[in-house]
């Protein structure tokens, strides 16, 4: 389901082109990317998992498919890689005069996080936006973009029957394992039927739903617009991201934007704004996903070489 969504296969159009930074990948990484998309066992993990199986460890498809390794890795790499590509698309496709800025969240230390929160408190109290946009007319209201990249591949996901967002519909509904939860986390929601005895039932729409304060509650209270750009580790784009790319492409086509996109020199490289930037975003996410699995495979091999096992 995730691999059938817009953007999930866009990275396949980003063929090796020496004029495009990051388009030339190691063969091992590209093989892992292809195996992940096709639902095949990841060969980079085979040796380590076979050795563990020989030692009596009961492995699973979740491990053989690379899902466990990818999910256990730090998701920051996928987020940062995808966000950088989205920012480049905005810079090249936004109307002339639009001010764009990345919201720096610090270097991970507690003090840097506090400094970042203080720096952006006038725009988004309590949370640092990923991208801050101010229109050419200088209106006080801003557009704040939140980029998310979550995996749709869960084991024993919560069903959402206790009033929370569901994360187990991904096999039947686009973004069914991710988007509902992300909307609640980012945008929050009001309470519903507070006097009802039963918790909210997603099947009927009835029951009590507790209010939830989203990450951007402060920004929304100040009148800013928040746009959630959700993606999945397959490279899939939510509708909001698809619409954004189309709007930016229209700006560029009309001449309302200063499009300085560096299109590839190779004959197979996309020359169309939407296709080029969609391929870049998708490739950044899927490459980071494959890199996390490759790193896990190397770590497994190193432990086996050291005789430590699992």
Image (cartoon, helix red, strand yellow):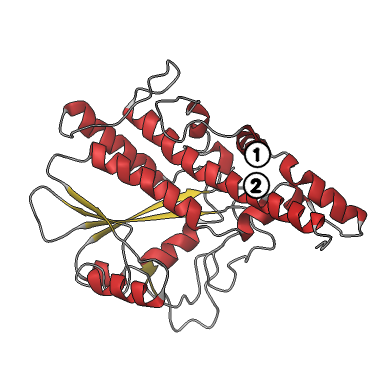
| Image point (24%, 54%), residue name | 101
Quadrant of the rendered image containing residue 59: bottom right
**Circles 2 and 1: CB atoms closer than 8 Å:** yes
> Which callout, 2 or 1, points to the residue nearer the camera?
2
Viewed as shown, does residue 58 lie left or right of 76?
right
Residue at 49% across / 81% down in the picture?
196
Task: Give whichever of discs 2 and 1 has the lower sequence position.
Answer: 1
Of residues 239 and 121, the one nearer the viewer is: 121
Report the disc number at residue 294: 2
Using the rendered image of the protein, determine whether residue 240 is visible from the camera's viewpoint.
no
Quadrant of image for the C terminus: bottom right
Q: Residues within 10 Å of mark 1 (few under 14, many from 20)?
A: many
Residue on which the image places disc 1 = 32
Name the outermost residue toward the front.
Answer: 306
Q: Is residue 12 above or below residue 36?
A: above
Q: Which residue is pictured at 38% across the width and 69% down the height?
A: 188
Evaluate whether residue 224 shows in this view.
yes
Q: CA distance from mark 2 to mark 1?
A: 8 Å
Q: Is 149 situated above or below 286?
A: below
Q: Quadrant of the N terminus?
A: top right
């Amino acid at each position: 389901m995730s691999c059938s969504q817009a953007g999930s296969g866009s990275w396949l159009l980003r063929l090796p082109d020496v004029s495009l930074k990051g388009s030339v990948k190691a063969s091992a990484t590209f093989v892992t990317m292809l195996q992940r998309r096709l639902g095949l066992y990841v060969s980079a993990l085979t040796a380590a998992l076979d050795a563990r199986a020989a030692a009596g460890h009961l492995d699973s498809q979740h491990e053989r498919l690379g899902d466990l390794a990818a999910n256990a890795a730090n998701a920051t790499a996928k987020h940062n890689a995808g966000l950088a590509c989205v920012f480049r698309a905005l810079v090249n496709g936004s109307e002339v005069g639009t001010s764009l800025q990345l919201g720096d969240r610090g270097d991970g230390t507690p003090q840097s996080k506090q400094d970042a929160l203080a720096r952006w408190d006038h725009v988004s109290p309590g949370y640092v936006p990923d991208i801050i946009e101010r229109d050419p007319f200088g209106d006080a209201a801003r557009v704040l973009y939140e980029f998310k990249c979550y995996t749709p591949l869960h084991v024993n996901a919560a069903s959402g029957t206790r009033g929370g967002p569901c994360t187990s519909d991904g096999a039947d509904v686009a973004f069914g394992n991710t988007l509902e939860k992300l909307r609640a986390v980012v945008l929050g929601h009001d309470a519903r039927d507070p006097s009802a005895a039963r918790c909210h039932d997603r099947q009927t729409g009835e029951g009590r739903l507790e209010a939830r304060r989203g990450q951007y509650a402060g920004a929304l209270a100040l009148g800013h617009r928040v746009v959630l750009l959700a993606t999945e580790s397959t490279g899939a784009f939510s509708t909001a991201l698809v619409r954004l790319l189309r709007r930016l492409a229209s700006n560029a086509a009309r001449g309302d934007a200063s499009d300085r996109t560096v299109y590839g020199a190779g004959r197979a490289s996309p020359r169309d704004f939407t296709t080029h930037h969609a391929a870049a975003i998708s490739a950044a996410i899927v490459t980071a996903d494959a890199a996390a699995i490759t790193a896990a495979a190397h770590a497994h091999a190193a432990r086996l070489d050291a005789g430590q096992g699992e």
